[in-house]
Structure formats: structure tokens, C-alpha cells
Amino acid sequence: MIIELQNAAATYQAPDGEVEALRDVSFGVEEGEFCSIVGPSGCGKSTLLGAIAGLEHLSSGSVRVDGQEVTAPTSRIGLMPQRDQLFEWRSIWDNVTLGLQVMGQNTPERQKHVRELLERYDLGDFSRKKPGQLSGGMRQRCALIRTLATDPRILLLDEPFSALDYQTRLSVSSDIYRIIREQHKTALLVTHDISEAISMSDRVIVLSRRPAVVKDIIDMGALKSLPPLDRRDSPAFSGYFNLIWKELDLHD
Amino acid sequence: MTELTPSPQRLAYLRRRQRRARLIRAWQIALLVALLGLWELSTRLGWSDGFLISSPSRMLATVAKLWREGQLWHHIGTSVLETVVGFTAGTALGTLIAVCMWWSDTLSRILDPYLVVLNALPKTALGPIFIVWMGAGMGSIITMTLAISLIVTILNMYQGFRGTDPEKIRLMRTLGASRGQILRLLVFPANYATLLATLKVNVGLSWVGVIMGEFLVSRSGLGYLIVYGSQVFNMDLVMASVLILAIAAVIMYRLVLWVEKYLNHLLGVMQ
């Protein structure tokens, strides 16, 4: 297990009271696996991701990455945030090398790696452009390359496609899925879109309403061998959809 | 989109646009000429008293006289220097304080009521205090401009810094960025536009501070000329100084816009 959560619980203090975000969350992610976390909005998904990234502290339980307890951000983990969060005033090149600059690793070898990534994913000609000159899909690829530049083993994707329109979303999620697979990364995707979770992941972890506990972990079975767009056409798709929908228990 | 051979409709549209632009410019010039002409005429024909309201020709004569006596540039230079020092110092110092407040939430909470009071206070009321403390001179005048522009700068910049996208800060933190790196690579550049907007406001405020300060104490500068002129009942000097002041302020604002454009070009900021 490259990510392992044991009885993770998190409570944070706010002026008007205590908020129990996570009650008892345990699950593991294998190296190279693509897992998704779905849950009702405001169920503590962000807190969970923050805890894995080392940004937030648990009140009890533990998060281990690579066998080591997480206490602060490490270079083993890369975050792909909500919307692309590219810095508009920086060129694409300066955006994708942001992490290297922050870590003080902006070396020729690392830059070569980033250049190869840009070339490979059809952004080579755009490195001097500004984010505003790129389409939504290209911006997402840039955001992913920015995350890959520091060569993390684990990618945390925090609803990265939520701001995209439906069509773009389908093609972008398929793009991102392919790149993550090609680069042999472990990925943990947080989303509230059930079909997105089914189309991209090996396993889907269903969280309850806040305070979050793991309600179920569903293996995508035969779907796992298919790329995202094909999964949506598969007869098994709607079965998984209904299963997760019921687990989420959104309506009352 | 520009095409190689514009359609007749396009050409007609462009012609209409150009004609409209010319018409507007013509009216602007005509209005100015009419106002100045009427002003001049009314004093010449004795409809009004040129001693009280001056006239364009008398203003020009006064400017020429100042020029011949070698005083013109001295007065303009004094006011311009004070203004430039004022808005530069106000913007820089205010931004620095805003950075400190962004850095320490506790500090910003401690300072909050003081900023509210200082912001509400008409800063010109502090003028006499500065004069007593710092003497009659450039020091008090620049302090006056600082007092006027500083608080606004702090409030604007701090609000800008606070408005930095929390998701971007989260991204920087996962990359292991220190607070200084977050400031340097994210918060500061994200507020570049706020800084320039604040600078432009400060140019205007700085002129207010300078003229106000010169009214109170100085021996030179455009504000001094205005106050001196009114004291000796030389309205030609007062009007001429106001005219020079207006021209100087406009030129300075233009220069600031030009510097902004140059900086944008240098940093590759898109409009």
C-alpha cells in the first residue's frame, strides 16, 4: 500500500463551534492504482485530501505514504487543484516549472524532463504563451504537467475538472487518465461526479455525509481494462452508477 | 479580424467611426476656443472685471513673466518633485506595511481599528501638526502627501493580498513553498494590477497633499504661487498657476500611464 489511512479522524475548530469533518476513515491505495473518492458535497473530501497532502492535521488515526507517517508536504505527492490554477502572469513554461522553482530544483536535467512532457502532450509550441491564450483542455494538461514536473509518485486530483463544460470534461478526463497511466503514477481523484469516478478509476471509495466514514469501496471489475470514454458505453456502467448513487443516499 | 479586402459594409462602418471621432474632437476644440474667447472678450469689452477673474491673455503674460524671471521652472520643479517623492514613498511604504499585515494576521487585527480611524480622519487636519514638528519646508509637505496616500494604499493592497485565491495558496503549500515564496511568487505578482491602480490613485492624492502643504507653509511651488497671488490680490498669478498646475498634473498622469504600459510590456502582462 502506497497510501494507507487508518481510522483517520479530523475535527477542526471554528469560532461558532467544532466541526467534525472525518470520523473514521480507513482505506489503502496500491502503487499504480487509480482510486476515486466520492461523497456528498461538504462531506470532508477536501479535508481528507489535505491530510494526505500533509496540509492538515488529523485529530487521531494516521496517514502513511510509502510507509511513512505524513506530517508535512512532501515531494512524493503532487496536487492537481480545483480548476487549473495556472498563474496568468507566468508563461506556460514558467507555470509548469513552478514546482521546480519552489523546490530549488530548476536544473537542466529536470527541465529536460519537463520539455519532453510538454512535447509529448502537444504543448511544446506553447511554452512561451500565457495561460489565457490556451483552451480549457490545454490548460488542464499544463496543470497536470506542472504536477508531474516535480516527479511525484502520487497525484492527488481535487475535483480538477469541475469548472469545465460537459463536452470538454469528457475529453479532458480521458486525456488526463491516459497521461497518468502512461507515466505510471498512483492517483487519488476526489469528485462529486459519479460517472467521472466510474470512468476513470480502478476502485471507488464512497464516503458518507459529514462526519465522513467510508461507506463502501467498489471495485470497477471488468471496466478497469477500458479507457474512460469506452467505459461510459459499457453495459456495466449504469449498474455501477446506480450502486454508487444508492450508497451516496443524496436524497432526503 | 482584418481581411485583405474589406467588404463595402465594413468600409462604411469604418468611415462612420472615423467621422464620429473627428466630430467629437472638433467639438472639444471648439468648446475650449469658445470658452477662452468669451472669457477674453468679456474682460476686453468690460462685461466683467479682468482684475477679479483675469483673462487668457493676462494669464499668458503672467506665465511669460515668470519664465523671464526664471521662476517658472523653479516653482513647477518644486511641486513636481514633492509630488513624485510623495506618491512613490506613499505607495512603497503602504505596500510594505500591507505585506507585514498579510504576513501576520495578528498584526493586521491589532492595526485594524487604527486604520479605520485614520482612514476616516481628514488628513489635512494633521497639516499644522506636521509644520510644528518638522518646520516649514519640504519635509512637512512630503509628510502631508504621505499622510493622505498611505492609509488608502495600505487598505487597498492588504485587501488585494487577502483576496489571493486560496486554492493557489494551497497549491503552493503542497509544493512545499515557504511563506516568503508564496508572497514572492504568488501574492505579489497576483496583485500587480492592484499596485498599479493604487499608484495611479496616489498620483492624484499626492497632488492634493502637495498643494495643501504648500498653501500652509512653503516659499516655493505652485501651491505657494496660488496662495501668494491671492494674498497680494494678483488674480492673474492665481489663475496662471492653476493653469500650470492642471497641465503639470495631466502630463504626470500621462507619464504614469506610459510607465505602466512599459512595465506591462516588460513583464509580458496581457491587457
Image: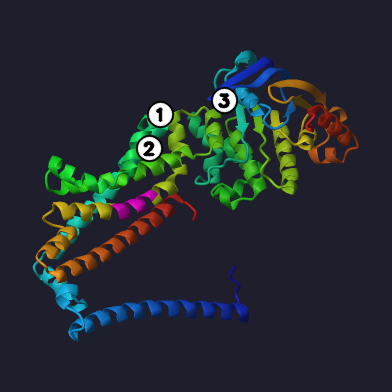
* Residue type for callout 1: Ser
Q: Is residue A100 left or right of residue A142?
A: left
Q: Which residue is mark 2?
A: B98
Numbered label attached to residue A193: none
Q: Residue at point 53% right, 29% down?
A: B173
- Look at 33% across and 39% down and name the residue there: B117
Q: Give, as a single range, the part of the protein colored magenta.
A: B198-205
Q: Chain of mark 2?
A: B
Distance from disc 2 to disc 3, alpha carbons, whole Å, reads: 31 Å
Going by the numbered disc 3, the residue's amino acid type is Ser
User: Are discs 3 and 1 less than 8 Å apart at CB?
Assistant: no
How did the renderer colour the structure? rainbow
The residue tagged with tag 1: helix, strand or loop? loop
In the rendered structure, which disc, 2 or 1, sits on the residue that comes first in sequence? 2
For label 1, count other residues whose C-alpha is less than 10 Å away and answer few (under 14), some (14-19) or many (20+): few
Rendered position, B86 above or below A111? below
Query: Dot 3 corresponds to which residue?
Result: A75
Which amino acid lies under the numbered mark 2 shown in the image of this protein? Ala
The N terminus of chain B, quarter of image: bottom right
Residue at (38%, 34%) from the top-left corner? B112
Q: Mark 3 falls on what kind of element?
A: loop
User: Pointer 1: what residue?
Assistant: B104
Q: Are marks 2 and 3 on the same chain?
A: no
Left or right: A5 in relation to B136? right
Question: Callout 2: helix, strand or loop?
Answer: helix
A249 or A110: nearer the viewer: A249
> Which callout, 3 or 1, points to the residue nearer the camera?
1
Q: CA distance from mark 3 to mark 1?
A: 27 Å
**Classed neighbour count for the residue bearing mark 3: other residues with Cα under 10 Å, few (<14), some (14–19), many (≥20):** some
